[in-house]
Image (cartoon, helix red, strand yellow):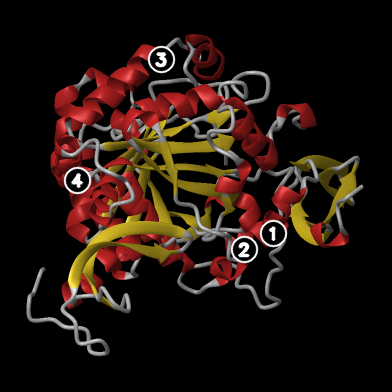
Amino acid sequence: MADATWKCGKCGVPLEVKKTVFSYLDRSFTHDVEVCPKCGAVRIPKELAEGRMAEVEEQLEDK
Amino acid sequence: MRIDKTRLGKTQSVCPVCLARIPAERVARGGDIFLEKTCAEHGSFSAVVWRGDDAQFDKWWSYSPPDNAPELAATCCALVEVTSRCDLRCPVCFAGAGDASTEPTVAELYEIFKKLADAGSTFVQISGGEPTARDDLPEIVAAARRAGCETVQLNSNGLRLGREPEFTRALADAGLSFVFLQFDGVTDKTYEKLRGKPILTEKTEAIRVCGENFLGVTLVPTLVPGVNDGEIGDIIDFAVKHSPVVRGVHFQPISYFGRYPTPPRDEDRITLPEVLRGIEAQTAGKFKIKDFNPSACDHPRCGFHGDFVVLPRGKIMKLTKKYNPDACCGADAHLKNRAFVARRWTRSPDAESAAQTEPAADARDMSAFLTRVKSHGFTITAMTFQDAWTLDYERLRRCSLHVFDGASTVQFCARYLTNA
């Protein structure tokens, strides 16, 4: 996941891997993602959005 | 008194004697709600349907049916009876006992399953009688799967499942998804009263054998006032301790199907809010009323559900989200419900082995949560069936649990209103 080529589009500094809190339907989860150390912008890779994040959403979907 | 008028109003019901459709009214008295009606020929009837007027239960009363509600809602789960034989003679059972001569063959059942699956009804409950009375039950399960049914549930008293592990293995191999196990309590006294036999050991054996065969088990207690309504907490505790084999508890307050010589007394009934209060009180607040929402797929007052994960050392993570009344009316409620119960009540061998290798993982970690919710998902649900005294057409029209015999689809409560 740590792709050294990614930089923050706004700040121009390299992203750093950081444990980040995600909230959905009143619940919070943590996951390591790349974050801009300056402005806090987070890069969500496609495979995370379509993979685990989508799975968490599905699991939390109520009947 | 806090009960407001929106809780009350007119509906339709049946006369418990002649079963003619007659007008009925929900009436508040002393903080409780009763269904009252008069048959021109057989007189007046009243039955308690809701006890208590606590504000926590308002969400069960926030639904108002659309004027154009169809007579038959979409099917979430189709129940198929494969036998009327049974190896128990329960004083509280509404299914008539019969012999093998009238049972549908596997080929006939395949046609029934095929009709269901082709119509998009891919979640079937194999029921009876006691389905394990049939030696060819594994072939029946295989037929359902072959016909295209994705989720195949077995309703069973569990006696044969525990006694004959090879039979249970054959069911699992045939593609059975999970078992709804009649489980009324954690004491033999309860079974003697409700089932006529002390069979707690047989029940725990059934759970053990299902566990060995990676079959999920949901415990299904019939709640009877004065018999096991004090065991609600113990049953939940037992279920949590047996996670992940046990996937949850599905409470069914007793209903009085069939023709009774005398009307059941109100003290012989336990209503949904009492079950919820019992859950909170008897689990010392481990599970609270606010952790539960009304049925979404069926009429809100037909039941409730709570969604949880059992964490290491029996800690509970709560997943039930804020109640959204609109969710209950969606055209796809039956599909959502079907997907929900299938993913909670079916075991995941992969997730269970992953959970074993990282048992102490932080459940807030996204990956650890995903593993744990699949391996140790846990539900507490309830469905309160209607009988000839409590039948409310508003509820019946929202029913998504249908009995299918190959020719007609009937709501569960309409099917079992009488023993005929």
Judging by the rendered image, the residue that carries numbered circle 3 is: B200
Mark toward the viewer: 4 or 3: 4
Q: Horizontal and vertical percent for residue B55?
A: 76, 50
Q: Are marks 4 and 2 on the same chain?
A: yes
* Marks 1 and 4 in Cβ contact (< 8 Å): no
Q: Tag 3: Cα neighbours inside 10 Å, few (<14), some, or many (≥20)?
A: many
Q: Amino acid at mark 4?
A: Ala
Vertical arrangement, residue B186 with respect to residue B419, above or below? above
Give the distance between the C-alpha atoms of the residues marked 1 and 3, in whole angstroms: 37 Å
Residue drawn 33% across the image and 53% down it: B342
Mark closer to the chain start, 1 or 3: 3
Residue B184 in view of the camera: no
Q: Which residue is mark 2?
A: B397
The mark total stands at 4
Residue at 41% in and 55% down: B78
- Name the residue beneath numbered marker 1: B393
Label 4 resides on the chain identified as B
Mark 2, chain letter?
Answer: B
Residue at point 50% right, 59% down? B400
Secondary structure of residue under mark 2 = helix
Measured as percent of width and height from the top left, residue B271 is found at: 69, 38
